[in-house]
Image (cartoon, rainbow, N blue to C red):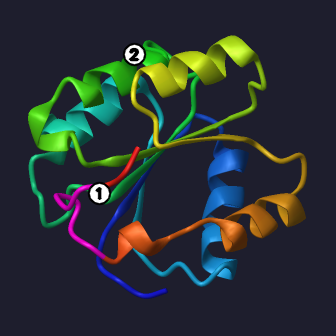
Amino acid sequence: MTGNSAILVVEDDEDDVALTRHALGAAGIRNPVHVVDTGPMAIDYLSGANEFSDRIKHPLPAAVFLDLKLPMMSGHEVLGWIRSQPHLESLAVVVLTSSNEPSDLRRSYSLGANSYLVKPLNPRQLLDMAKAFNWSWLQGSPREPVGR
């Protein structure tokens, strides 16, 4: 897939970021990928605040891949903040986490996650997941409605 819609990865583990980038590229996803490693940085990025105020360098993404276990603020808190922002109501949020706890899954969906994916154990599984995922929402504007 080609396109200009950005993807924001909110992840504090550099190895997971590298694997995610690799899997997206191998799956043919050529959209720009931006990475932040804390919950407050994710909020700053999505708000266009502080170091992320230049929307040419830091465009509003079409999708967010959100880890739940983040420093300073949990992924659930970030997700709750995203869904409280009217201008982000159509933003696709994919929880990509190592947690397979039913309570995390239920809470993520109740807060408005579009998808909940448990991180695979190896790069091949991540690539297979990236290839199988429905990427159609990356072709449109981040303001177009996205089904939940």
Residue 20 falls within the magenta-colored stretch: no
Disc 1/disc 2 C-alpha distance (Å): 19 Å
Q: Would you say residue 122 is visible in this rendering?
A: yes
Q: Would you say residue 48 is visible in this rendering?
A: no
Residue placed under numbered mark 1 in the picture: 61
Quadrant housing residue 4: bottom left
Tell me which residue sits at (37%, 24%) in the image: 78
Q: Earlier in the sequence, mark 1 or mark 2?
A: 1
Q: Amino acid at mark 1?
A: Pro
Tell me which residue sits at (52%, 24%) in the image: 108
> What segment carries the magenta color?
140-145
Q: Are marks 1 and 2 in contact (CB under 8 Å)?
A: no
Tell me which residue sits at (42%, 88%) in the image: 2
- Does residue 124 sit above or below 50 in this rendering? below
- Does residue 49 sit above or below 133 in this rendering? above
**Magenta stretch: dominant secondary structure:** loop
Indicate the position of residue 105 as horizontal and vertical percent values.
64, 24
Quadrant housing residue 122: bottom right
Q: Amino acid at mark 2?
A: Glu
Left or right? Give the position of 105 relative to 73: right
| Quadrant that contains the C terminus | top left
Pick the residue in front: 134 or 20: 134
Residue placed under numbered mark 2 in the picture: 77
Total marks placed: 2
Tell me which residue sits at (70%, 74%) in the image: 131
Task: Kindly state the secondary structure of the residue where label 2 is placed.
Answer: helix
Left or right? Give the position of 78 relative to 115: left
Indicate the position of residue 91 as horizontal and vertical percent values.
29, 48
Task: Kindly state the secondary structure of the residue where label 1 is placed.
Answer: loop
Indicate the position of residue 99 as horizontal and vertical percent values.
74, 25
